[in-house]
Image (tube, rainbow, N blue to C red):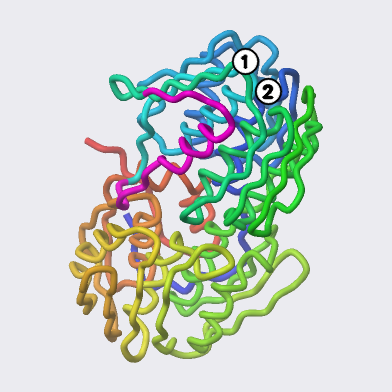
Amino acid sequence: MIEGSNKLQGEVTISGAKNSALAILPATILAGSACTLKNLPAIKDGVYLRDMLIQMGAKIHISGTDRIEIDSTGIHTHKIDIEIAQKMRASYYFLGALLGRFKKAEVPFPGGCEIGVRPIDLHLKGLEALGAKIKISHGIIKAKADELIGAPIYLDVVSVGATINIMLAACMAKGITVIENAAKEPYIVDTANFLNALGANIKGAGTDVIKIKGVEALGGCEHSIIPDQMEAGTYMVAAAATKGDILIKNIIPTHLESVSAKLREMGVEVTEYEDSLRVRSVGKAKAVNIKTMPYPGFPTDMQQPMSVLLAVSEGTGIVTESIFESRFKYLDELKRMGANIKVEGRVAIIEGVHKLTGASVYATDLRAGAAMVVAGLAAEGKTLISNVNYIDRGYERLEEKLINLGAKVRRLEEE
């Protein structure tokens, strides 16, 4: 329940990146010994992955709120539990990690948010290029290899998931693997840095060509996960939408350049510091056009919160979603709050209104849930958001952080 029309003001500290954590947790399997991860976000998806690792025989010790030690020495199976895997998308990273260590893996088809077709054929093609034989039976992906051998792999479509999965499998493959048209997201760099700390030989992460020279074995390490650019971006937009003033701490400003640029174009004041930035509203925001693109373009995960800001801006903005074809479902919820939006295929035409008004709405997926929160904060009156389990999958202590910024938010137990 959100009581809107309160300016968000103060400071907020950003947690570790969800998308990095979801790749690095399965990657600890490759170490075959103990790893320590710092700045790990306390989110539902992280809990699911920890449960999977424990079921497989890993020993986990948690100290403090964001530090975890994972000892994967005792992992005794190459099979993943179907029940947990279907709750989330990132379970597919176990394919590359298990294949890399045991030369075999059995992983159920992933679940997660329904935001359109997200085929994993690129992952499978990449693993097959390394020498894995893949069979799909009763919803389980079964991969097996006598040995993995480095190969040149060209990705037809830029894919974060496929890039990471191939990196995981190729670390201990014989010879050299070259991934062309690789994704360049910060999570790729973070995962490569983690793998290199284990003893892998990966060069070029963050560019569109990644070279992986296979090594004999990997060991343990200590690694700190990068800050979450999507969480930071959400607070940036929330500051603008509520006409507020927020200092956002523990971030890497370069990761947020596309969001900062759009906010500045809208007339919002964005000041960058070394590891923080300040977002301050100076009058009504002006509408802009947005097209989602792979990094370093405007992120698809920020499209929904930004559309809320456009809904209360001056003028008409056009949003083109070029990554996922079903990422506009939440706009029907936004219309309940008085937004003026017309959707034509992958394009949304958003005409700014004077104000949104509180209503009962539904989180259709993780980032849509975040958008509904931003809408509720900006709206007049009370907004009730249901299906918040989606939000818990990607935002750590959301209501606590918002309350510290002056929001009126409370979590209601379902009757």
* Quadrant of the snapshot with the C terminus: top left
Against 183, is 257 above or below? below
Residue 275 placement: quadrant: bottom right
At 28% from the left and 69% from the top, the residue drawn is 346
On-image quarter of the N terminus: bottom left
Name the spot of residue 235 as percent of width and height, x first.
52, 64
For the residue labelled by badge 2, is the local secondary structure a helix, a strand or a loop? strand
Please report the residue visible at 59 percent of the width from the left and 27 percent of the height from the top: 97
Is 116 in the magenta? yes
Q: Which of the pair 47/136 is nearer the observer?
A: 136
Whichever of callouts 1 and 2 sits on the residue coming sooner in the sequence is: 1
Q: For the point 41% across and 40% down, which residue is it?
A: 120
Badge 1 marks a residue whose secondary structure is loop
Residue contact at pointers 1 and 2, CB within 8 angstroms:
yes
Residue 38 left/right relative to 233: right
**x, y percentage for residue 374?**
39, 65
Q: CA separation, marks 1 and 2?
A: 7 Å
Asked if one can make out residue 18 in the rendered structure from this viewpoint, the answer is no
Question: Callout 1, which amino acid?
Answer: Ala
Q: Position of residue 310 (x, y in %)?
A: 37, 79
Mark seen at residue 58: 1
Residue 90 visible in the picture: yes
Local crowd size for mark 2, using a 10 Å CA cut-off: few (<14), some (14–19), many (≥20): many
Amino acid at pointer 2:
Ile
| 372 vs 359, nearest the viewer | 372
Checking the image for residue 70, the label placed there is 2
Whether residue 129 appears in magenta in the rendering, the answer is yes
Range of residues picked out in magenta? 114-135
